[in-house]
Image (cartoon, rainbow, N blue to C red):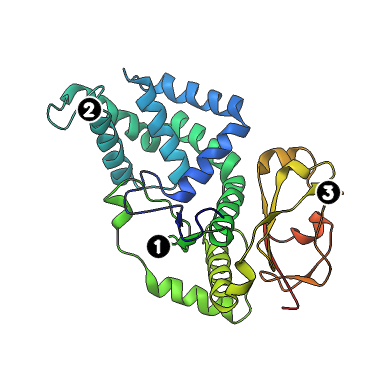
Amino acid sequence: MSWPDAMTALSTHDTKRGEDVRARISVLSECPGAWAWTVAVLAARVELSDGPLAHLVWQAALGAWPISRDRLQAYAQKAAREAGVSTTWTDPDGVFEAALARLVDALYEDAPSIEALASAVDRVRTAGWTNSLSAKLIQLTAPGVPDVYQGSELWETSLVDPDNRRPIDYPKRRELLARIDAGWRPPVDESGAVKLMVTSRALRLRRESPELFGGYRPLTATGPAADHLIGFDRGGVITLATRLPLGLANAGGWRDTRVELPAAGWTDVLTGRPAQAAVAGILAEYPVALLVRGH
């Protein structure tokens, strides 16, 4: 609340990895052993003298997958040259860059590499979507002025410019938004339509009821999964979001975790359902909720 007019953003024109790429990569902190196994497989298939750069590229591939080979090759070369460790813009090392290109090619041509990366993506995909929706709703409803970078109304899996400046399919977004406005509640899936729903509902609420966003008070959760809930009351609007979703699932979900809601009569703007104190009920359909009274 110290800077209520400051901009909040998850992606900009200069973001090195799109917000949803980062959201998926962050899941690796919950499964370091499994990721270490993936890296061991990938490293055994193609040798690169710059280990940190190889790891950077593999993480980018995981976060942006599925991504075309051309896009990933361009990202890897730019990342390497800007790091200035093994090659540079002013003095490119052709031998090293050829080895780097082979490392990327392996993700599309080498069966063990393909299988290892696919397994890792499958492991973190759903949790990554949860992280994405949580980060987006928090950004849009927390104190500050939210900025939504072009195209990030759906999953934003771009990498560094010019990858994040590709043409945006606005007709697709208008079509999905029309369906949402007609009552469709999209699933959490590859389409990213659920992120468009969260974005449009949160921004419209801020526009139509700015008086509900004048304060900030953290909410307290109790129960076995309390540490997995982020909640705050802006003075008439409550945001609830999930953190560390892989650990939450492995521990058995929300179970009897409850959140302290001020007064009664809250409804989730995303689902239209009344909200009670049980977190498992509020977040039964989506990993986030946007609650108002008498809506």
First reached walking from the N terminus: tag 3 or tag 1: 1
Q: In this view, does 134 lie to the left or right of 227?
A: left
User: According to the image, label 3 marks what residue?
Assistant: 257
Tell me if residue 183 comes above or below residue 1 in the rendering.
below
First reached walking from the N terminus: tag 2 or tag 3: 2
Between marks 2 and 3 in the image, the one whose residue lies nearer the viewer: 3
User: According to the image, label 2 marks what residue?
Assistant: 98
Which amino acid, mark 1?
Answer: Gly
Q: In this view, does 74 lie to the left or right of 188?
A: left
Between marks 1 and 2 in the image, the one whose residue lies nearer the viewer: 1
Q: Which residue is drawn at 66% across and 69% down?
A: 270
Residue 240 appears in the rendering: yes
Q: Which residue lies furthest to the left in this view?
A: 90
Q: Foreground residue, 102 or 235?
A: 235
Residue 287 appears in the rendering: no
Q: Where is residue 72 in the image (x, y as percent from the top left)?
A: 33, 41
Query: Which secondary structure, mark 1?
Result: loop
User: According to the image, label 1 marks what residue?
Assistant: 151
Which amino acid, mark 2?
Answer: Ala
Tell me if residue 121 comes above or below residue 148 in the rendering.
above
Q: Foreground residue, 79 or 266?
A: 266
